[in-house]
Amino acid sequence: IIKYLSREFEISPDGEITTQGYITPWIKILLLHYIRTRGKGELSGRWVSYSDLKAGIIKASSFIRECEEPLKELFESDFDITETILTRFGAERRSEFSTRNAWLMYLLPKIPILILYWQKEDEFESKVKILFDSTADRFLDAESIVFLVEGLVKNLEQLKSKFISVTPT
C-alpha cells in the first residue's frame, strides 16, 4: 500500500493497482516506476531545488513552468482555498523557513516536498519554490518527479474549481 495525496493505492505482486475511486493511467505508471526503482536509504533532511537533483538541470525550466508557476497562480488567485486543499492532501505548515508560508508534504513515502510561498510585497512579486529531500532522485528520476508534482498541481486546480463552483457568492 502506497499513499499519494491522502489516498491509498494497493499494488499487488503482479502490478495491478486498486484504490477507492478513479485512478488515472499516469499515477499507475508513476507508482509502478517508484516501486521498480527500488530506491534505498533514509532521507537526508537536506532540502535542495529541483535543478540540484540528478538530471534536474535538464528539466528545470519545465519544472518551473509546469509546477512552480501554476502553483504560484493558485496561491495568488485564492490563498485560503489553495491552503485548505493542500492541508487535505496532508501538507503540514512549517515555521522554520524564510517565509511564513511553508508546507511539508509527502507525495510518496520517500519523496517529501517543501512548498515555500512568498506573497507579493511592495516591489517584490510573489514567488513559489518547491524543494526536495536531496535523496529524491534515488526513488524517481527527474522526469517522473516533474510528473509527480504536476499531478499535485492538477489535482489542486481541479479541486479548487469544484470548491469555487459550490461556494455561494
Image (cartoon, helix red, strand yellow):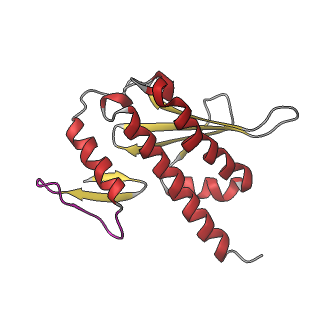
Question: Residue 99 at x, y = what percent?
Answer: 68, 33
What residue range appears in magenta? 12-23
Is residue 169 positioned above or below 39 on the image? below
- Which residue of the protein is positioned furthest toward the right in this rendering? 122
Is residue 45 positioned above or below 127 on the image? above
Q: Nearer the viewer, residue 100 or 70?
A: 70
Question: Residue 139 at x, y = what percent?
Answer: 31, 34
Q: Examine the rendering and report whether any part of residue 93 can be seen.
A: no
Residue at position x 78%, y 36% in the image: 125
Residue at position x 29%, y 58% in the image: 9
Q: Examine the rendering and report whether any part of residue 107 can be seen.
A: yes
13 with respect to 47 (left or right): left
Residue at position x 55%, y 57% in the image: 156
Question: Residue 93 at x, y = what percent?
Answer: 58, 43
Question: Residue 130 at x, y = what percent?
Answer: 55, 35
Q: Quadrant of residue 14?
A: bottom left
Q: How many marks?
A: 0
Q: Quadrant of residue 108?
A: top left
Q: Magenta region, mostly helix, strand or loop?
A: loop
Q: Nearer the viewer, residue 124 or 45?
A: 124
Picture quarter with the N terminus:
bottom left
128 with respect to 138 (left or right): right
Picture quarter with the C terminus:
bottom right
Q: Quadrant of residue 53?
A: top left
Look at the image and say whether residue 35 sits in the magenta stretch.
no
Look at the image and say whether residue 15 sits in the magenta stretch.
yes
